[in-house]
Image (tube, rainbow, N blue to C red):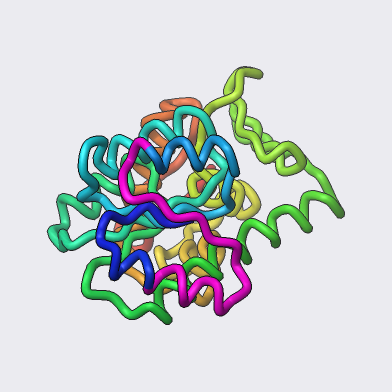
Amino acid sequence: MAVEDDPAIADLLDMYLRREDHRVYLAADGERGLELIAAHRPDVVILDVGLPGIDGLEVCRRIRASDAAVSVVFLTARDDEIDRVLGLEMGADDYVTKPFSPRELVARVRAQLRRAAATAAATTVAPAVIEVGSVEVDLGRHEARRDGEPVGLTTQEFELLAFLGANRGLALSRRQILDGAWGDGWIGDERTVDVHVGQLRRKLGDDLPLVTVWGVGYRLD
């Protein structure tokens, strides 16, 4: 699904996504976008930040309040680092700035779908629960719990936590984490890892023994 107020860009997204045999829903503002998301529960939402009325950041916040599983890819003309970080902190899984390559954007959508499919296949074959202190990572339910209580994580936050949990005790570089949690075809800034690590720490607090290894990356003890 694409929520984009520029008709030319919306038509471009529609054309390229349909070429890949995706079912596409279009909305020109945040309010209509939220209505369609609730009605159709899309796998991926391409979300323009600068929407009229309810902007993309608020739309993302409302999506995350009701559904942590849907992947959100921000599309925006803003290229400032603060805006990129804010977008990720609001729960976006990826971030593309205008002007953009439609082929690259479609590739990013494809990557989000691959990760979701791979997670579903892995958990169907071998459901497991990874325990890290008082935090449980339930691969079968795609759910994180702290002291038995579910914690709302985005899809990418969960993938990051699951990858770190599967490699407990190992110091992992940002590149290794990107390849393992995002997939080796992921394109983007390694700072994405730092932002998502910050979100995990904020949501799980001291219950998550996640250590910064200076000069290397991160280690989950």
What x and y, as percent, mark residue 141? Answer: 73, 37
Q: Is residue 119 toward the left or the right of residue 173 in the image?
A: right
What x and y, as percent, mark residue 156? Answer: 50, 50
What x and y, as percent, mark residue 186? Answer: 46, 72
- Residue at position x 42%, y 29% in the image: 203
Compare residues 120 and 44 and report the one nearer the observer.
44
Residue 22: say if magenta: yes
Compare residues 165 and 103 and report the one nearer the observer.
103
Q: Quadrant of residue 94?
A: bottom left
Q: Quadrant of the C terminus?
A: top right
Q: Is residue 20 toward the left or the right of residue 96 in the image?
A: right
Magenta residues span 12-31
Q: Quadrant of residue 41?
A: top right
Q: Is residue 207 above or below residue 115?
A: above
- Residue at position x 44%, y 51% in the image: 72
What x and y, as percent, mark residue 80? Answer: 13, 59
Compare residues 163 and 53 and report the one nearer the observer.
53
